[in-house]
Image (cartoon, helix red, strand yellow):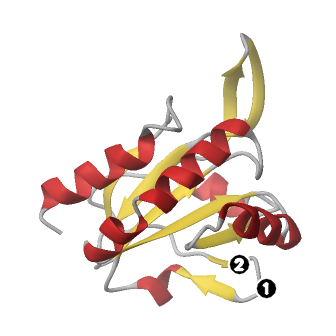
Amino acid sequence: MAIEEGKVAPAFTLPDADGNKVSLRDLRGKWVVLYFYPKDNTPGCTKEACGFRQLHAKTTRRNAVVVGVSPDSEASHQNFRSKYKLPFVLLSDPDRKVMEKYGAWGEKTMYGKKTTGVIRSTVLIDPKGRVAKHWKRVAKAADHPEQVLRFLEETGS
């Protein structure tokens, strides 16, 4: 399934770091920054998460919530959240079913080799549940949170 801007975002329900089920429908009425990342506590993923943390107040003022998704366990997410004081939800997708729905699992090139894994990407979902923007492949994890905030500001949210 391809993610298309303007179309309804695929529904999902996943457990957060504390084992609570979080569904996209629960977030209706807010902008949702749904970002997919490969692994907790790795350099790029940590930079991206800390970037979203630094911009959390500005993002929240834009009626937006940040939701990170990786295949890591709930325990790993608890550790990552605690270690870096992350103020947003981290969801666990060990079967990668949601990642597949959102085009965040597949073939990628890493260090010059083709491999299959999590594709660092972000889907911005509007308050009505439609895809407003899809960053299919995020090249610079550290710069991406600012890019998302700029887009939110430009939409007038």
Other residues around mark 2 within 10 Å, as few (<14) / some (14–19) / many (≥20): many
Residue 74, quarter of picture: bottom right
Residue 110 is situated, as x and y percent measured from the top left of the image, at: 72, 21
Question: Can residue 34 be seen in this snapshot?
Answer: yes
Alpha carbon distance from label 1 to label 2: 5 Å
Secondary structure state at the residue bearing disc 2 = loop
Q: Amino acid at mark 2?
A: Asp
Q: Is residue 84 above or below residue 90?
A: above
Q: Amino acid at mark 1?
A: Gly
Q: Residue at x 27, y 75 (%)?
A: 61
Residue 67, quarter of picture: bottom right
Secondary structure state at the residue bearing disc 1 = loop
- Residue position for label 1: 19
Q: Residue at x 70, y 67 (%)?
A: 81
Residue 58 is situated, as x and y percent measured from the top left of the image, at: 31, 66
Q: In the image, is 49 to the left or to the right of 148?
A: right
Q: In the image, is 89 to the left or to the right of 124?
A: right
Residue 129, quarter of picture: bottom left
Marks 1 & 2, CB-CB < 8 Å contact: yes
- Residue position for label 2: 16
| Front in this rendered view, residue 75 or 109 | 75
* Residue that sits furthest to the top in the current view: 112
Question: Can residue 1 be seen in this snapshot?
Answer: no
Q: Residue at x 51, y 61 (%)?
A: 53
Q: Residue at x 43, y 42 (%)?
A: 144
Q: In the image, is 135 to the left or to the right of 47?
A: left
